[in-house]
Amino acid sequence: MNTDENFHDEMGDNHIASSDATPLRSDAFDRTDDEKIEIIKKDVENILNTLGLDLTDDSLKGTPNRVAKMFVKEIFGGLNPAKKPSSSTFDNKYKYNEMLVEKNIVVYSTCEHHLLPIVGRAHVAYISNGTVVGLSKMNRIVDYFAKRPQVQERLTIQIVNELKKVLNTEDVACVIDAKHLCVNSRGIRDIESSTVTAEFGGRFQEESVRKEFLDYIKLETKF
Ligand SMILES: Nc1nc2c(ncn2[C@@H]2O[C@H](COP(=O)(O)OP(=O)(O)OP(=O)(O)O)[C@@H](O)[C@H]2O)c(=O)[nH]1
Ligand SMILES: [Zn+2]
């Protein structure tokens, strides 16, 4: 898919954002990554200068460029729909009709309110409607949407909606258990708390199916 089609896919018809879409401006990808890095580098320089730091110090002088590259290429690299992983699917020839659960997928994301890390685990499940997806593609989809400024609720829904499209079924679910450093390391500074979010599509709304999934993942906080 080219970038335009991916952007359209992300934003929905007529570029009206779907309710789970990350709020992006329509010119979000007019600049190249390198152009963005140059601009952000200056912005970070400005922040550090304002804080009174000496950017000629050899430990600090590379920081603006390092942070700019990290924002564009790494922690916010999933903003660009052109980077959405392609998901190989296969026929369910073997007629595996039970749920498949990919659990304990590591999540590193960034809270969009404070730009601090969100660290946790995602658990994803689906029931095949004739199609199966390569296992690693579920981890890749989680990672792609995690690499954006996020709230955990939107991240959970984006993962489920993408897998619904890939697998052509409503029967998809995701639970995320994650720590928000904005809660753990500053503000209220509650190091113990974590946040659980869930989205249950199709048959996962049936009590027995939901219970089976939750039994498989038996939430224990492991970070
Ligand atoms: N619903 C939701 N809230 C989040 C998420 N990540 C961070 N937050 C919250 O976003 C809120 C932002 O609230 P504000 O009152 O504007 O920010 P603040 O003054 O820094 O608040 P404190 O964090 O309480 O110090 C905080 O309560 C955060 O805990 C998330 O993924 N989902
Ligand atoms: Zn936060």
Image (spheres, rainbow, N blue to C red):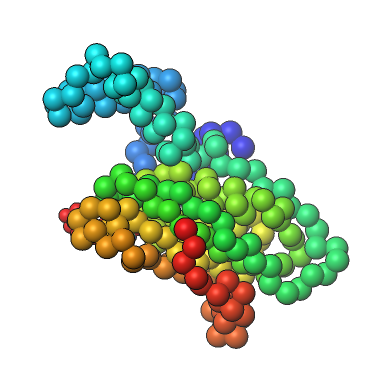
Residue placed farthest to the bottom in the image?
208
* Rendered position, 145 above or below 193: above
Taking the spot 38% from the left edge, 65% from the top edge, the residue there is: 195
Nearest the camera: 143 or 59? 59
Q: Residue 120: in sight, yes or no? A: yes
Please state if 36 lies on the left or on the right of 46 as rendered. right
* Ligand 1 lies in quarter: bottom left
Residue placed farthest to the top in the image?
56
How far across and how far down the image is residue 118, in percent? 39, 52
Please state if 144 lies on the left or on the right of 194 as rendered. right
Residue 33 image-quadrant placement: top left
Q: Residue 13: in sight, yes or no? A: no
Taking the spot 26% from the left edge, 47% from the top edge, the residue there is: 114
How far across and how far down the image is residue 35, in percent? 39, 20
Q: How many marks?
A: 0
Taking the spot 53% from the left edge, 54% from the top edge, the residue there is: 106
Residue 91 image-quadrant placement: bottom right
* Rendered position, 144 above or below 46: below
Taking the spot 57% from the left edge, 61% from the top edge, the residue there is: 104
Residue placed farthest to the right in the image?
94
